[in-house]
Image (cartoon, helix red, strand yellow):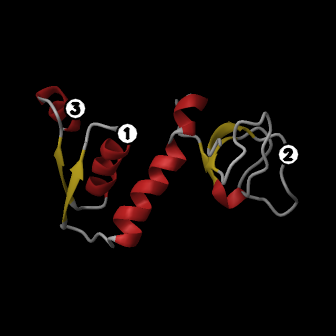
Amino acid sequence: MGLEVSGEIIAIGSKVNKYKKGDKVCALLAGGGYAEYVKVDAGSCLKIPRNWTLEEAASLPEVLCTVWMNIFQIASLKKEENVLIYGGSGGIGSFGIQLIRAFGANPYTLAGSKEKLEFCK
């Protein structure tokens, strides 16, 4: 339990040069994220986006990994291709729409109401 974490770095390994003590990061773990302190490989960390809370940042790695693996690694999305996202107003769906557009492809979505479709736009 506890795959997503965010917080402040309190110590770093001698070979880590990308981060420093005091940096705020988020990460995806194999488990144990409910602990007060966790040890995370530096390659698994992401700097927290400016103006994001720790709670918001904890959601980023899981969503990013899910979208990236499915759309870009497994499906090998190319520019100008079309992608249908079911449930585009949810967390993974809305992130997928944004990432697909950012990479020059065309997201399409289904949603259960006009309000949800407006959100997707």
Identify which residue is drawn at 83% across, 51% down.
12
Dividing the picture into quadrants, the one containing residue 91 is top left
Residue 10 lies, in percent from the top left, at: 83, 40
Classify 17 as above or below 3: below
Q: Residue furthest right?
A: 14
Pointer 3 or 1: first along the chain: 1
Identify which residue is drawn at 45% across, 48% down.
63
Pointer 2 or 1: first along the chain: 2
Q: Amino acid at mark 2?
A: Ala
32 left or right of 74? right
Can residue 28 be spotted in the picture?
yes
Pointer 2 or 3: first along the chain: 2
Residue 2 lies, in percent from the top left, at: 65, 41
Callout 1: helix, strand or loop?
helix
**Mark 2: few, some, or many residues within 10 Å (few <14, many ≥20)?**
few
Dividing the picture into quadrants, the one containing residue 68 is bottom left
Q: Amino acid at mark 3?
A: Phe
Query: Residue 76, labelled with which disc?
Result: none
**Mark 3: few, some, or many residues within 10 Å (few <14, many ≥20)?**
few
Classify 78 as above or below 112: below
Disc 2 designates what residue? 11
Q: Separation of disc 2 and disc 1 at Cα? A: 32 Å
Disc 3 designates what residue? 119
Frontmost of labels 2 and 1 is 1
Cβ atoms under marks 2 and 3 closer than 8 Å: no
